[in-house]
Image: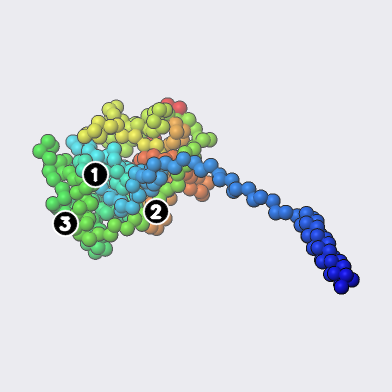
């Protein structure tokens, strides 16, 4: 019995010794196994402070920040520029203004409204021509006018253009002012025109081509030009642009007087001035013109107090673009004026660099 008890005790001691040995081995092995290192928290990159909601949108025709998504379809408004129509109303709210001859040496504006304009008065409104249709439609604009040449009316009707004409299909959305005599007293507003396009069921989808914008612009290596003059055909259309260092715009004067918006007094100015030469042809005794806005030609671009020489192009379905050595150049964010002058007698005869 004693032998059995001693044997049993020995066996129990062995088991205990074995357990201690195993535990020691496990601890040793555990010590040898590499322990996972604590995973550091991912470093959060400091995000730039977000602009207030509403300033994150960029207007397609100016490259400037706007409060709302710029989804509205453009309006291409024919604006009277006869001396009796000056000063005009609402032009300071246009994103792009194209100035081109109409007839008899008188120029006309195509004002493209997209990112600005509301209840403010716009006008005086004037008639349309075939090349004005081409230019306005290149920005996918609903064409806004009062009357037109026979050829222009034929195009509008046969091709079912989306347009609003005070004479034939849009009278309720225009009004006459008693301050001026007809035909220099017809006005509208962007809000009225939007209401009219809604009523007519015109498309609201924005499909226009747009420009490329860059704060540096494209004229860093250009020739310094602080002031220049444009001459059309009549002495009453002497346009001067003076560069304003503070605003970064070329400010417009006509016959020595600031070209101001009648209603708010703001002088018209633009960050980009494109002067484009085009072939003009007189069509009739009235002096109506054909202006070639398809083939392109010689051009100048003025930005940031400098000028570069290049060409303008307008491919099918596209807008007027300024190119240098075959490549489109960037515009400075801001408004743009496009002045189309005759190629004859020479393009250079219509542009005079007066302060360099």
> Are there few (<14), some (14-19), or many (20+) residues within 10 Å of tag 1?
some
Q: Nearer the viewer, residue 1 or 189?
A: 1
Residue 26: x, y in percent? 78, 60
Q: Nearer the viewer, mark 3 or mark 1?
A: 1
Nearer to me, 334 or 353:
334
- The reply to whether discs 1 and 2 touch (Cβ–Cβ < 8 Å) is no
The answer to whether residue 315 is above or below residue 112 is below
Residue underneath mark 1:
118
Mark 3 or mark 2, which is nearer the start of the sequence?
3
Label 1 vs label 2, nearer the camera: 1
Q: Secondary structure at mark 3?
A: loop
How many numbered marks are there? 3
Disc on the earlier residue, 3 or 1:
1
Question: Between marks 1 and 2, how big is the CA–CA gap?
Answer: 23 Å
Q: Tell me which residue sits at (31%, 52%) in the image.
A: 72
Asked if the residue under mark 1 is in contact with the one under mark 3, i.e. CB atoms within 8 Å, the reply is no
Res. 3 image quadrant? bottom right
Residue 261 in view of the camera: yes
Residue drawn where x is 22% and y is 55% of the image: 197
Residue denoted by label 2:
209
Looking at the rendered structure, the secondary structure element under dot 2 is: loop
Name the quadrant containing residue 5.
bottom right
Give the residue drawn at x 49%, y 38%: 216
Horizontal and vertical percent position of residue 98: 32, 44
Seen as rendered, the residue at the extreme left is 178
Q: Is residue 21 left or right of residue 57?
A: right
Q: What percent of the width, then of the height, locates residue 346?
A: 40, 40
Q: CA distance from mark 3 to mark 1?
A: 21 Å
The residue under label 3 is: 169
Q: Dot 3 surroundings within 10 Å: few (below 14), some, or many (20 or more)?
A: few
Secondary structure of the residue carrying tag 1 is loop
Task: Tell me the CA gap for discs 2 and 3.
Answer: 28 Å
């Amino acid at each position: 019995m004693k032998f059995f008890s001693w044997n049993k005790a020995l066996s129990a001691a062995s088991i205990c010794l074995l357990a201690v040995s195993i535990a020691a081995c496990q601890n040793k092995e555990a010590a040898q196994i590499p322990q996972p290192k604590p995973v550091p928290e991912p470093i959060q990159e400091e995000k730039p402070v977000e602009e207030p909601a509403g300033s994150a949108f960029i207007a397609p025709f100016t490259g400037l920040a706007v409060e709302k998504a710029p989804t509205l379809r453009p309006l291409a408004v024919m604006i009277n520029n006869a001396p009796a129509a000056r000063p005009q109303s609402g032009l300071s709210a246009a994103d792009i203004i194209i100035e081109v001859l109409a007839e008899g040496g008188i120029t006309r504006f195509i004002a493209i409204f997209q990112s600005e304009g509301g209840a403010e008065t716009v006008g005086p409104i004037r008639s349309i021509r075939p090349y004005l249709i081409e230019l306005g439609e290149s920005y996918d604009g609903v064409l806004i006018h009062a009357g037109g040449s026979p050829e222009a009316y034929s195009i509008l009707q046969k091709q079912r253009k989306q347009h609003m004409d005070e004479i034939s299909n849009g009278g309720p959305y225009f009004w006459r002012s008693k301050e001026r005599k007809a035909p220099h007293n017809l006005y509208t507003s962007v809000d009225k025109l939007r209401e009219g396009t809604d009523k007519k069921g015109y498309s609201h989808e924005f499909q226009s081509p747009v420009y490329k914008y860059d704060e540096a612009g494209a004229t860093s290596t250009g020739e310094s030009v602080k002031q220049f003059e444009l001459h059309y055909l009549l002495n009453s259309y002497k346009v001067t642009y003076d560069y304003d260092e503070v605003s970064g715009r070329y400010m417009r004067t006509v016959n020595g007087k600031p070209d101001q918006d009648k209603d708010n007094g703001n002088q018209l100015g633009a960050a980009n001035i494109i002067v484009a030469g085009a072939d003009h042809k007189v069509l009739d005794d009235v002096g109506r013109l054909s202006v070639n806005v398809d083939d392109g030609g010689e051009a100048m671009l003025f930005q940031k107090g400098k000028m570069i020489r290049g060409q303008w192009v307008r491919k099918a379905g596209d807008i007027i673009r300024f190119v240098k050595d075959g490549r489109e150049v960037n515009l400075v964010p801001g408004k743009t004026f496009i002045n189309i002058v005759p190629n004859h007698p020479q393009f250079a005869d219509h542009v005079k660099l007066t302060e360099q």
